[in-house]
Image: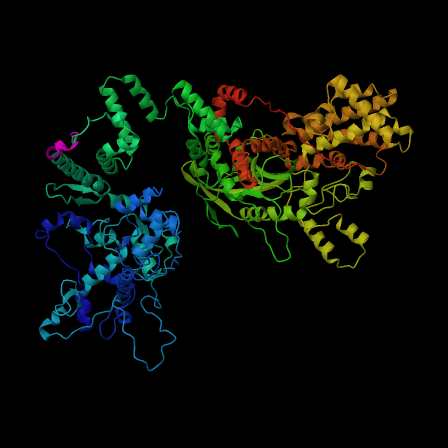
Amino acid sequence: TGQQRWASSTAPVVTDPSGSKTQENQPEVAMEMAGSPGSVMKLCFGGKSKENMESARGRVDLKLQEIDTHMNLLKCLCRLCGLSIRKAKGPSHEVQGDLEESSRCALRRMGCKLLTWPEVILKVFKVDVTTDMETVHPSLFCHRCWTAAMRGGGFCSFTRTQIPDWKPHTSHCNLCFPKKSSFQRIGRKRAKPLKSSHSIPKRIKRDSSESSGANRVWRQTTENTAGSGGKEWLKLSVQREQWVKNITQCQRDHLSTKLIPPEVPADFLRAVTCQVCDHLLSDPVQSPCRHLFCRVCILRYSRALGQNCPTCNQHLNPSHLSRPAKFFLATLNSLPLLCPNEACNDWVRLDSFREHCLNHYHEKESQEEQTSSEQNIDGYLPVNKGGRPRQHLLSLTRRAQKHRLRDLKNQVKVFAEKEEGGDVKSVCLTLFLLALRAGNEHKQADELEAMMQGRGFGLHPAVCLAIRVNTFLSCSQYHKMYRTVKATSGRQIFQPLHTLRNAEKELLPGFHQFEWQPALKNVSSSWDVGIIDGLSGWTTSVDDVPADTISRRFRYDVSLVSALKDLEEDIMEGLRERELDDSMCTSGFTIVVKESCDGMGDVGEKHGSGPAVPEKAVRFSFTIMSISIRVEGEDDGITIFQEQKPNSELSCRPLCLMFVDESDHETLTAILGPVVAERKAMMESRLILSVGGLLRSFRFFFRGTGYDEKMVREMEGLEASGSTYVCTLCDSTRAEASQNMVLHSITRSHDENLERYEIWRTNPFSESADELRDRVKGVSAKPFMETQPTLDALHCDIGNATEFYKIFQDEIGEVYQKSNPSREERRRWRSTLDKHLRNNLKLKPVMRMNGNYARRLMTREAVEVVCELVPSEERREALQKLIDLYLQMKPVWRSNCPSRDCPDQLCQYSYNSQQFADLLSTTFKYRYDGKITNYLHKTLAHVPEIVERDGSIGAWASEGNESGNKLFRRFRKMNARQSKMFELEDILKHHWLYTSKYLQKFMEAHKNSAKAMQATFNPEETPDEVDVALEVPDF
């Protein structure tokens, strides 16, 4: 009856300890699954009752039977094309196996050096089969797909092979239950089933004498022919056990419970047994319902039979699995197990059981090798089949050397794979080292040993890479230097180019793994992303004109991860200096990032081809300013890293390079749109990254401060610099700013500019153009990137120096007494001023004001020289007083920390700015009557408020990004190529390596050698100061 079958199938099996002693000592027993019928029954029922699962005919475990049928069908199909393997004439091949000797030789002739089929399939068919499961994917592929791989040489496929989408088995599986074709009509004769399909054999009638084995099922075997009628039956519990084995495939990996002492209580034995495979727990995990499984078994079970607990049938998400308690793991590892070796009856702990068995295996292998070496002692004797005398090995060609040492090479390779993990190079070098020691050639042996230990005469690859990048050597120049030094010294001091390329992979974005929690919105979760096309997010339609530009960039999150890994040593050093343990760093790290973007002007070159592109370029870059952490119990964060040189080109990392004019608002918006989206997504998530060997969380705060006046107006959608609305921080007009030069506050924001743009676009009040413009305060385009309302110190210096340069000309010509001087008179005054500055200060005139000229012009020495040309003594005193006030205010916005560097000037800034404004409105009223320049207004009105809010203005300047302009031109000259697209990729890559802290440390250690190398191979001097230019509109 059904109840009798239930009782017989779930009854525990009792074995005789004395009788099973010989079986327990066998190695197969240690690795095979013994299978407890009770837990297997739980697995088969999935936590449900017998009445729900067992039908009237006693059919149980239907789902496992379906999985077994599904797997048998998969064995007949090709993994790649999905067709039947029997239809392809030729042998089948293992998907996860190694290349056969014939296949490997054939691919080797065509230049393919791959060794396994997964690598070839990934290269040819673009399919990753390393994560295949036995219950989902076929394990073989047919001879047709093998032929396609061979014809493509292991690199591509010349046939269109449509890879099927393999899915887990369901109740509507198309493989097990094929759909009826549409052309088959009702009443037509039913088609015969496929021969390869596996159907459940029917139960045959049995005598009443066999009623005790009512839980046995019949199975057709390959040994019995179909005509003989011989059948083989298996118990239902054994059949279930076989089905579970087919799913988990853990018989050779997990240990049997029969190795545990028989006096262990049954409850304790169930506690340390996997509820899926009935083996001892291996890498145990615990479900939310507090059941224990092997990690591999529960994952394969969930993939095959659904995400339910095998014990209680509750929903089980594999991501919710956790490690058991530490005391349980300690108890599990301390279990005594009986050694399966017949000659050894020791009881070994579970945590040392593997090493104990490996020792027996190595002893057996050594005995076999010793026996085989004695039998084959003549295998290494030289063979000479006659003919001409045998030549020495060193006098042969390389091909002949390979042929003679073929057998030895294979034997060394087999030994390396068996003993050293396949490291053939180390085995050969060790043999060579021992041969040198045996011949008393200790000098060469010492050099070889030093090279093997990484401290040889040659430089470290990172040092060579740093020398190449910092001295701007092209590939051909470096290779020429490498060959010359190697030929003259006889030693390989510098590393070859391929070694440098391997070293730079670890420093470029796309090498380190990471994760975002929650995942970034509209951003791919892949981490191995290098340089991508900046136009990849370009939306095109029928009416749109194709993008007439070239852009290359890194993905924002990937580049931030690479920058953090580059600062890993500094982060850990900061934690050690402040004595912060990992247990105290639970709240995560806070990263403050400065963003910069500016045009580089004309970067045109004579070489290059490809599409017609504008010769102006724009760079978007970022700088990690500080890293802080909040400790539990403290309100303020502790800064563990602070960028010491925030305005250096060595700390400003490039993110995006594009050949585009910064005035082209549409193109600039389209290219930087994906960057803005990635930036917004990262602000709403946190990064999980391994730093110092532990996973740590990071949150990012972005501050767009490295923009000049022109770029801020482009990004915030404001009118151009010559607009009536003079300031990007407040709503003042130029007339209001000239009347009240000091008393203004910051009122503009990114959100307010978006609201004003909507008003400008919709005009809800039906106003005229002038009224609408007055309402939106100069907003004329949609803001697409949020910028920090601040002042750029570098461009402020340039803008103010341009204004003082014009004041000097007006004072020389006494404009305060004249009205509307002619253009010829202004040219004569400017020529007089330039000539006088050149003769006295060696200051050459420039077409456009730049940073170097501005710094030398705004000094007391320059003002004294200018005052020699001013006729009036009163005007000379006023001009000197104006410059003195300016020089007292300048350190406040130029210093990285004004409260520390210039506290007195910071306290007197408001008073000095008021005195400065009074002089402009009285003595120099002829120039500032109803008008004032943009940067002069920000200098007088907004500097104290910005310093009080941010603590500094100079540290957040764009000087580092501007310093990269000369680097762009030098890297472009270094990486001159026929295509500008590849040229831009090389520039972006080498500029990133130039800013690497890792390479900078190597350059500090090898400073003298680097300077000598630069003087030898690149004698062209590099200006130390920043050379940037700014156009200031003349009102």
What segment is highlighted magenta in the picture? 373-382
Residue sitting at x 79%, y 50%: 774
Height in image: 443 above or below 852? above
Q: Is residue 584 within the magenta segment?
A: no
Estimate the x, y position of residue 392 in percent, counting from the top left: 23, 25
> Can you tell which quarter of the image residue 823 is in?
top right
> Can you tell which quarter of the image residue 376 is in?
top left
Estimate the x, y position of residue 501 in percent, counting from the top left: 44, 34
* Count of picture labels: 0
> Can you tell which quarter of the image residue 1024 is in?
top right
- Asked if residue 402 can be seen in this view, the reply is yes
Magenta stretch, main secondary structure class: helix
**Along the line of sight, the residue nearer the viewer: 625 or 869:** 869
**Along the line of sight, the residue nearer the viewer: 360 or 258:** 360
Height in image: 617 above or below 258? above
Indicate the quadrant containing the N terminus: top left, top right, bottom left or bottom right.
bottom left
Estimate the x, y position of residue 129 in percent, counting from the top left: 35, 52
